[in-house]
Image: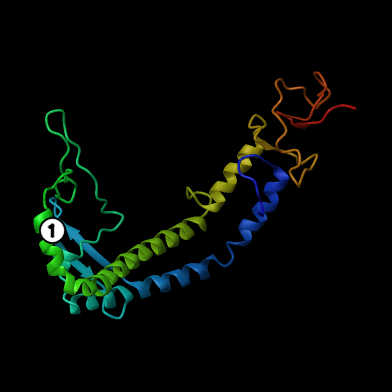
Amino acid sequence: MAFDFSGTFTASQFTRFRTYVQDQLKPIDARIQHLQAERDRVGNLLFAYDAGGIPTGTANDPPDTYCGKLFGAYEVLGGDVEFDLNVRSSSQPLFQIAGSEARPAQLMSNGEVMAVAGLGDAPSSLIVQQIKSWVSDDLKYRRGALERKIRRAIDYAEQLDLEIGQLKKTKGDASVDGSLAFLLNQIDAMIADGRYTAVTNDLTDPDPHGKLARAPVAGYMPGQDGKGTPASTFERTYDGLAKPQV
């Protein structure tokens, strides 16, 4: 794989990688524009819930968006959004409400009581299955399939929002935490810091292929400036890579 390194590399290796990622900034505006157009096409389908997890309202985009069309089709097929389609976005997580020493956890955040094993509902379950038998295909292939499409559409819209946000942050200047310029500056600081030996500053003795990048860190720093004991093996030191003296 190209640029097959992570935290251990040489400055020469990273220079090539820097050139590559900076080139990818050139089409980033066009990419954001394309993703935003797709996001507008998908549209929105939002649900609001009260503190007890009961749906209090829904909002959907006009029927010309994908979510709007799915929402309309769901209602045409007899779906009741308030009772049947309790969809949550990633900002509305479902979780177990913590209990206490005196009272164990029993409720989920949507107000449902957690079931226990052994419901003893076999007689009623068999009857309900018989009642459903002649409409099972309708429930499974019409309503069920449409519900899955709606959930996938909402998830897709959220993924588009995340990617658009990430790209906008990436193109920011060096003052934006998480931007490409900000992150490159952090690596530059590590390259300049001789005590951070995971990154080898090989600018004076280039190793662009990174053949020596994983040399062991010296147990003591032999020094390459003529001082100290000469290195007997390949080692990473505060002064860069030390090669064994012939």
Q: Identify the residue at horizontal 51%, vertical 56% (top origin).
A: 170
Task: Specify the farthest residue to the right.
Answer: 246
Q: Which residue is mark 1?
A: 125
Q: Please provide percent x and percent y for residue 23.
A: 63, 61
Q: Identify the residue at horizontal 55%, vertical 47% (top origin).
A: 183
Left or right placement of residue 167 versus residue 238 in this view: left
Q: Please provide percent x and percent y for residue 34.
A: 47, 72
Q: Quadrant of the C terminus?
A: top right
Q: Identify the residue at horizontal 82%, vertical 24% (top origin).
A: 232
Left or right placement of residue 58 versus residue 42 in this view: left
Left or right placement of residue 229 versus residue 39 in this view: right
Left or right placement of residue 89 versus residue 132 in this view: right
Q: Identify the residue at horizontal 75%, vertical 39% (top origin).
A: 202
Looking at numbered disc 1 in the image, what kind of residue is underneath it?
A: Ser
Q: Please provide percent x and percent y for residue 200.
A: 70, 37
Marks counted in the figure total: 1
